[in-house]
Image: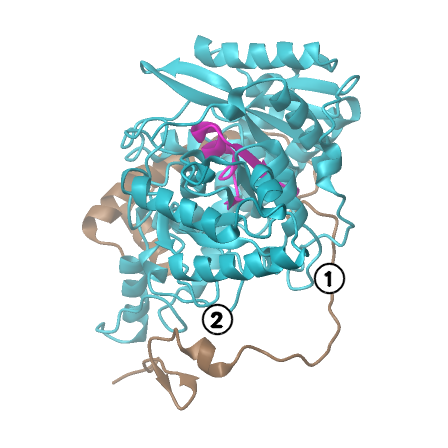
């Protein structure tokens, strides 16, 4: 099954990954080939088979609700591109 | 002696350190000298932490002189660059994290530090561990120490090459679909992927969270057992870490495998193999039979042929969610000059991620998107159940399954770079293990002539969940009955 150019752009938008024109063309071809390979699974009979989301038989692991120190704020913010008054700064979501 | 200390196995070094015949500082200096001498050709390291390593070595010497060293006190270790190291940049092979300096240590790093190991540096890898050759590193290629025009395998290819070139005594890698075992096979070293949940991933940069596992890359099986002893065990900070007791893995190193039931997995030794590679498997099986194991050919796990599609739906789906955190706001590369917040975010991810990472994010986003979830992601999870059940059935009859790690020895740099499907197929024998969550080891099993060069080939052993002891038992007996682990690459 081939992906259209519009479908590639739609997926890129959902993933918030910018692509240049050359990448769009390349991914259209490569992703189509990879998705073709997935088609073999459609023919497999999985009627009544439970999905495995996780290989361990662990469920709902809980920890004690105890107060613990967290990382020092300055250490965490040291990697941030923009900060202001001890907080992360971002561009406004809605701008004029 | 001091001009060849870098060639030691870790357990050999430990003996010399304990008796103070060699100091940790001398040993560390020998490894740093080796890195300086050959890493220009190999390219295994992204960061060498020389100053810190010498400080840690001095601390180790003090500890050893007090007589309270551990098996790893004073022993140099290299870390794949997706394990967080406080105060030392952790790039994950990506422009996105080129300047990222973690504010904390990963669990495995804490364990190594507590044991007194000396961390010599951070090794090269495919970006975000996505790849089979390290060619997807944003920074540099890594060259296979056995043939410098060839790939070391990936994604833990920097760690495998560093061990193979004697640029460290021990290394850690991570394995999501073969990323420890495949480079171990291609570089002629031991690579162990423990059971999912055996080693805490706290501080490991996440890729495929239901698949990722940390494990050792070493020069021999004893070193793998010693390193696993140090890093295994429950950690409350990783909810998927198994709350189980950890055995002493060196207890498996008996050399005795009489009566052990080993099944040769048919799909892992296919009929169309190159004859030279096939001969390596035949010789390994013959050696295991001589050692008294009950080996049976032709064990079939028919869903193996669906593992590639299953994996390349599940892993990219999980990756697309995990990598959503790279938004240019909290840490990492940030594009600032765009037309508003959304544009900045898209451009951050456009310029911060390389092609393979974008490709996988796109596959995963597609597989999880409305209208396709049932056909792709949910279907893959059901096929995952089939693959897991086939392993369970096989382990009712066999203690260990045997097959190849990789269909071919190391390929040439550039050979598969522009053909993602060909690259993905190089992991066809390693992916099912991660899908099922079982432990597996790659052990050097000889050399095959491939494209006119003699190159290392590893065999893969697989066992029941949390039965690393059986893996190590067979691997050790086999290794001690052969000389392959003593053949070193000349760089």
Q: Position of residue B432 (x, y in %)?
A: 58, 33
Q: CA distance from mark 2 to mark 1?
A: 26 Å
Which residue in the structure is indicated by mark 1?
A61
- Nearest the eye: B239 or B318: B239
Which residue in the structure is indicated by mark 2?
B103
Q: Quadrant of the C terminus of chain B?
A: top left
Q: Chain of mark 1?
A: A
- State whether residue A42 appears in this view: no
Name the side, left or right, on which B440 lies relative to B315: right
Rendered shade, chain A? brown
Rendered shade, chain B? cyan
- Dot 2 crowding, Cα within 10 Å, few <14, some 14–19, many 20+: many
Q: Position of residue B461 (x, y in %)?
A: 63, 27
Q: What is the number of the mark on residue B459? A: none
Residue reaching furthest to the bottom = A85
Instruction: Provide the secondary structure element on which disc 1 rests.
Output: loop
Q: Are marks 2 and 1 in contact (CB under 8 Å)?
A: no
- Magenta region: B172-195
């Amino acid at each position: 099954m081939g992906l259209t150019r519009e479908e590639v752009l739609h997926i890129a938008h959902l993933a918030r990954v910018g692509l240049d024109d050359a990448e769009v063309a390349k991914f259209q071809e490569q992703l189509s080939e990879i998705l073709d390979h997935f088609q073999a699974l459609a023919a497999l009979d999985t009627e009544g088979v439970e999905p495995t989301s996780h290989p361990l038989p662990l469920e709902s692991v809980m920890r004690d609700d105890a107060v613990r120190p967290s990382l020092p704020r300055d250490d965490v913010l040291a990697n941030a591109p923009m900060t202001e008054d001890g907080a992360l700064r971002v561009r406004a979501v809605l701008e004029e | 002696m001091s001009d060849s200390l870098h060639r030691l196995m870790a357990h050999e070094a430990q003996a010399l350190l304990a008796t103070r015949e060699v100091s940790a500082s001398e040993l560390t200096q020998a490894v740093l000298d080796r890195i300086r001498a050959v890493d220009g050709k190999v390219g295994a390291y992204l960061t060498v932490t020389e100053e810190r390593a010498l400080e840690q070595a001095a601390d180790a010497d003090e500890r050893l002189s007090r007589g309270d060293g551990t098996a790893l006190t004073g022993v140099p270790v290299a870390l794949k660059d997706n394990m967080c190291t406080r105060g030392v940049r952790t790039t994950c092979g990506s422009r996105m994290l080129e300047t990222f300096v973690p504010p904390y240590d990963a669990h495995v790093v804490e364990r190594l530090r507590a044991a007194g190991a000396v961390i010599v540096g951070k090794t090269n890898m495919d970006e975000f561990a996505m790849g089979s050759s390290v060619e997807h590193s944003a920074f540099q290629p890594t060259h296979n120490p056995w043939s410098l025009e060839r790939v070391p395998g990936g994604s833990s290819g920097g760690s495998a090459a560093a061990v193979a070139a004697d640029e460290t005594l021990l290394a850690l890698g991570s394995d999501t679909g073969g990323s420890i075992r495949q480079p171990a096979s291609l570089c002629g070293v031991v690579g162990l992927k423990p059971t999912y949940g055996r080693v805490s991933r706290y501080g490991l940069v996440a890729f495929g969270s239901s698949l990722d596992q940390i494990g050792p890359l070493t020069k021999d099986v004893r070193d793998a057992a010693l390193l696993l002893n140090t890093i295994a065990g429950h950690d409350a900070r990783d909810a998927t870490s198994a709350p189980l007791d950890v055995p002493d893995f060196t207890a498996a190193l008996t050399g005795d495998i009489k009566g052990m039931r080993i099944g040769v997995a048919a799909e892992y030794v296919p009929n169309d193999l190159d004859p030279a590679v096939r001969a390596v498997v035949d010789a390994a099986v013959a050696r295991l039979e001589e050692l008294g194991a009950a080996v049976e050919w032709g064990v079939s796990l028919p869903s193996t042929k669906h593992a590639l599609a299953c994996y390349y739906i599940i892993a990219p789906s999980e990756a697309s969610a995990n990598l959503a955190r790279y938004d240019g706001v909290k840490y990492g590369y940030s594009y600032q000059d765009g037309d508003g917040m959304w544009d900045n975010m898209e451009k951050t991810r456009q310029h911060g991620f390389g092609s393979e990472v974008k490709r996988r994010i796109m596959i995963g986003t597609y597989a999880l998107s409305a209208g396709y979830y049932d056909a792709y992601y949910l279907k893959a999870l059901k096929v995952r159940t089939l693959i897991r059940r086939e392993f369970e059935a096989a382990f009712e009859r066999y203690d260990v399954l045997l097959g190849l790690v990789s269909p071919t020895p190391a390929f040439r740099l550039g050979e598969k770079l522009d053909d993602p499907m060909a690259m993905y197929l190089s992991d066809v024998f390693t992916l099912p293990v991660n899908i099922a969550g079982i432990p597996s080891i790659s052990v050097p099993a000889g050399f095959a002539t491939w494209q006119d060069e003699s190159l290392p080939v590893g065999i893969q052993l697989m066992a029941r969940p949390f039965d690393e002891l059986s893996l190590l038992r067979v691997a050790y007996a086999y290794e001690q009955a052969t000389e392959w682990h003593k053949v070193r690459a000349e760089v």
